[in-house]
Amino acid sequence: MTLLDRQGRDVAPPPASGRRLDLRVPLFATAAFLGAGLVFLIQPMVVRLVLPSLGGSPAVWTTASVFFQAVLLAGYGYAHLSTRALGLRRQPVVHLAVLAVPLVVLPLALPSGWRPPTSGSPVLWLVATLAVSVGLPYFAISSASPLLQRWFSATDHPRAADPYFLYAAGNAGSMVGLLAYPVLVEPTLSLRQQAWLWSGLYAVFLVLAVLAVVVVRRSGPPLVAAAAAPARPEAAPSWVQRGRWVFLAAVPASLLLGVTTSLTTDVASVPFLWVLPLAVYLATFVIAFGRRRLPLALPSTLVPVAVALVAATQLLGGSRLAGAVVLLHLTTLFLVGLLCHGRLAADRPDPSRLTGYFFLISLGGVVGGAFNALVAPLVFDGVHELPLALGLALLARPVAVSAGRRSLLWGLVGLAGVPAAYVAVDELRHDTSSPWLVALACVVVAVLYLRTRVTGALALAGLLVMAATPPVGTVLSERTFFGVLRVQQAGGFTTLRHGTTVHGRQPLDPIDRANPSSYYHPSGPIGQLFSSYALDPRLARIAVVGLGTGTFTAYARPNREVTFYEIDPAVVDIASNPRWFTYLSGAQGPVDIVLGDARLSLQREPAASYGMLVLDAFTSDAVPSHLLTTEAIRLYFDKLEAHGLVVLNISNRYLDLTPVLAGAVEDLGLSGVVLADAELTRPQIEQGKTASTWVVLARDAADLVPLEHSGVEPIPLARRDGIDAWTDDHSNLLEILDLRWW
């Protein structure tokens, strides 16, 4: 086989015998793998650093993702422009200097003394914090993928003509880095140790980059097979082609964040659930840019069916079959990713235009992510970006538009079938015994879509829009940085929901409106606690972390002052509006509300300020772990009088927090008991009561004796082997994760 250089000149091939071992592919593949792994290892690590200050909101990850995508875009832009300006002889040397600069700011750490704002959206604060803490090293490492591919294309290796296989290697590294964090890194290392680990791996990558630059500068003219040599230089891509690259990259990026937000808001705020969509997203890149060409017929055919099934789950309510819903969302993301990224891979240009190509792909990722993180929260009152991304995914299918009278007829049938399907679904929302009928109706619409393309797509899009409408009985829907809040009036109650989690309810009947309900019901643990300590003077001043609907004020008295600490201003507005809830406006004692992160706010309070501190911040299932560390519990007792009580609502569908608290009690020399209330009678359910689990902590076991005479039997806290108390530097949600929800 004749070998030619890029200018078409004959080059003698290397001798067949006596050839030295060629390590260039392993070198570049390892560098691409490690560089991409560092890119995705740093992301959850830094988010873990900032989460304590922002209450564990899913929006933290969404905003951080957009930041990382924007810096990635800047890195890809730098790779493209610097290569064009400096050439492949000088640019690698300059980039080594760029890689060396972050060494002066390692190991990673948040800027000292930075605190989020107490009012308004913390998005700008979060972006600024990320920029100062990780912006420089992330920028330096983010350009690794396109540069390593471009450098490799300048070598005389036979595979230099198509270096895109290194992109697959890089995305494989991204998956490993992403999954390694929750499974290996966080459970075994403290945050400081994690920072040092990342710094050490960064130094290893720098060494590999130096070796790669040496290889590039020692290489002769790049060799390509004669059969693969282009007859003439490839023309510059048209603006239509560039726009298509951006679109095909933006759709799965938007869908990625839409699926993540939908799962963590409407299905389950399970720790690490956001890792799964990102891993699936990266896997589609690995497959699409692998050595074998990806056939697009299968994902193109299955995408509309998957979209229709997602619409069905949205119509029924995502939390009914959590495991199946998660699997369906991930499968849909996988199919759309294969479709879009497969089309991108099939349309990849000559390596000489590689950096510009990846810049446009990165631009598409930023466009899709920015829409979800920045535009959608301002425009929508629910998670509507998911159906929009799914609708756009339908347009990514590489199929011709059907024409003819038969297609028009099928389209009209499809459009007429949507209202009928909606009426059926509206009825079935109240009849959960027939969920598969909803799925069947959506599959029928999907079949219509396959037959009619454009008009069928309109029918399916209409179904998606209806799936995104608020549930029956919703009187208020508001989206904030901390999630989607909905006020519903149904079944004789006004209920405040955060995603699928109930944050309190109040009877609509004026006679019963003042009675506490949900997990504050008088027969529940908190009601029994107040009954046991009814005349105790330590209840004169109470601090409550988490406002909800303000139900706790049902236990207020003229001689009992209650101070709430709430991080979300929208919750304060809803609870204070007597149109929805009257617990606050009808309180029988003085009530104060402090806006901001509870732990930071409590630090400003004088010592021994309260007799009881109630933490009701864990029922949203996205646990703010910084409120459960030994440092936090020590702070709580510093703010309590000598015989004060710390009361924690640890009701949670996915986590067992009791061993964490048991470890803290043992380490701090405290006493504690569990008050569980899982069995409910029908009259209690009709009164709005919900099951709950509470933990009561005290300095001395004697302070807990009154609970022995309550209606709920106290259970001593028991430490579980292998589970240590959490600290500000180390926590492990994985070890207390209960997978029975699946």
Image (cartoon, rainbow, N blue to C red):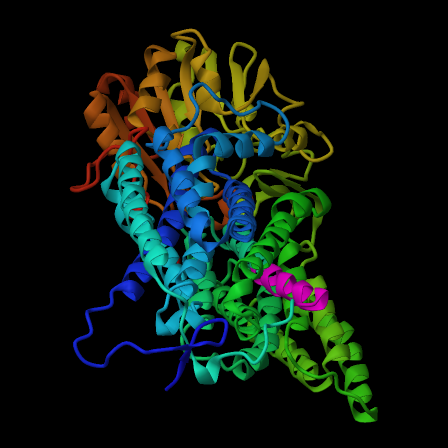
Which quadrant of the figure has residue 246?
Answer: bottom right
> 641 or 522: which is nearer to us?
641
388 or 581: which is nearer to us?
388
Residue at image position (49%, 79%) is 229
Asked whether the viewer can see residue 434, the reply is no
Q: At which x and y percent is residue 390? A: 63, 65
Q: If the image is split into quadrants, where does the C terminus sit?
A: bottom left
101 relative to 26 in the view: left or right: right
Residue 703: quarter of image? top left
Q: Which residues are magenta?
A: 237-252
Place of residue 289 in the rendered image (x, y in percent of width and height, measured from the top left): 45, 70
Point out residue 580 in the picture as x, y percentages from the top left corner: 70, 35
Residue 316, position as x, y percentages in the image: 59, 64
Whether the magenta-drawn stretch holds residue 242 is answered as yes
Q: Residue at (54%, 59%) from the top-left corner? A: 358
Q: Residue at x 51, y 47 (%)?
A: 75
Quadrant, the N terminus:
bottom left
